[in-house]
Image (cartoon, rainbow, N blue to C red):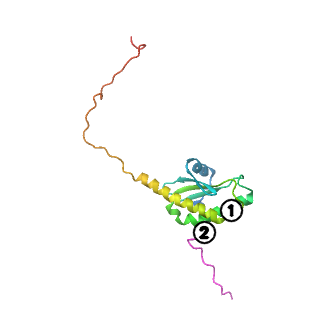
Amino acid sequence: MNTASPPPPPSSGSFVFPKTVRLLKRHEFLQVQQRGQRMDVGPLLVFVHPRDLLPLRMGITTSRKVGKAVFRNRLRRLIRDAARRLLLPGAELLHFDIVFVAKKGLALDISQQEIDQALLTLQKRLQSFRGRKSANKEKPKKVEDAGPKEPDATHGTSAVTLSPTEKK
């Protein structure tokens, strides 16, 4: 008789990286890289493009210039793990598309702590970036007095001057 209890169901706080929070298409990556703001955060170059009331989405790019396939795959795993732990728990508050680009010449023994530190720095910048964006939207527009206006002296008249070749 088996007395072991079944494993608990996955909690809502599980560290997953679903398709809804990933950039999947090439044109999505290019749009963020072309229109987004560029941020240098330690071993990563990050492109951030604001989205209107849509949740956070992320993508990771590591070119062959960064290193061999094993290193590039390890780097992507480190970035994904850090993003799961540090960015996704507060993703409903961040309305951005983010592309992480690994810099050329990274040390082969880069640690998870270095990537974590870079993402913590990014998180602080995103919060201040969001604050600046909302501050710009909240500025009241200047309203002019709706009272009667005096007519301009030149209003209603048009002066046409002819060049010497047009005069007859």
Number of marks present in the image shown: 2
User: Where does label 1 land, which residue?
Assistant: 110
> In the image, what residue type sits under mark 1?
Ile
Magenta residues, dominant SS class: loop
Residue positioned 69% across, 57% down in the render: 106
**Can I make out residue 129 in this image?**
yes
Residue extent of the magenta highlight: 1-13
**Residue 83: image location, x then y, percent:** 60, 63
In the image, which is nearer the foreground, mark 2 or mark 1? 1
Q: Position of residue 35 (x, y in %)?
A: 55, 48
Quarter containing the N terminus: bottom right
| Residue 80 seen from this side | no
Residue 75: x percent and y percent?
A: 68, 60
Task: Give above or below for 129 relative to 168.
Answer: below
Q: Quadrant of the C terminus?
A: top left
Whether residue 43 appears in magenta in the rendering, the answer is: no
Q: The disc labelled 2 sits on which kind of residue?
A: Phe
Q: Residue furthest top?
A: 168
Residue nearest the observer in this picture, 4 or 114: 114
Classify mark 2: residues with Cα within 10 Å, few (<14), some (14-19) or many (20+).
some
Image height of 40 relative to 163, above or below: below
Q: Residue at position x 63%, y 65% from top?
A: 113
Q: Locate residue 159: give its quadrant.
A: top left
Q: Which mark is residue 24?
A: none
Residue 11 is one of the magenta-drawn residues: yes
Where is mark 2, residue-wise? 15
Residue 117 in the figure: left or right of residue 64: left
Q: Check disc 1 and report its element: helix, strand or loop.
A: loop
Query: Mark 2–mark 1 contact, CB under 8 Å?
Result: no
Mark 2 / mark 1, whichever is N-terminal: 2
Alpha carbon distance from label 2 to label 1: 22 Å
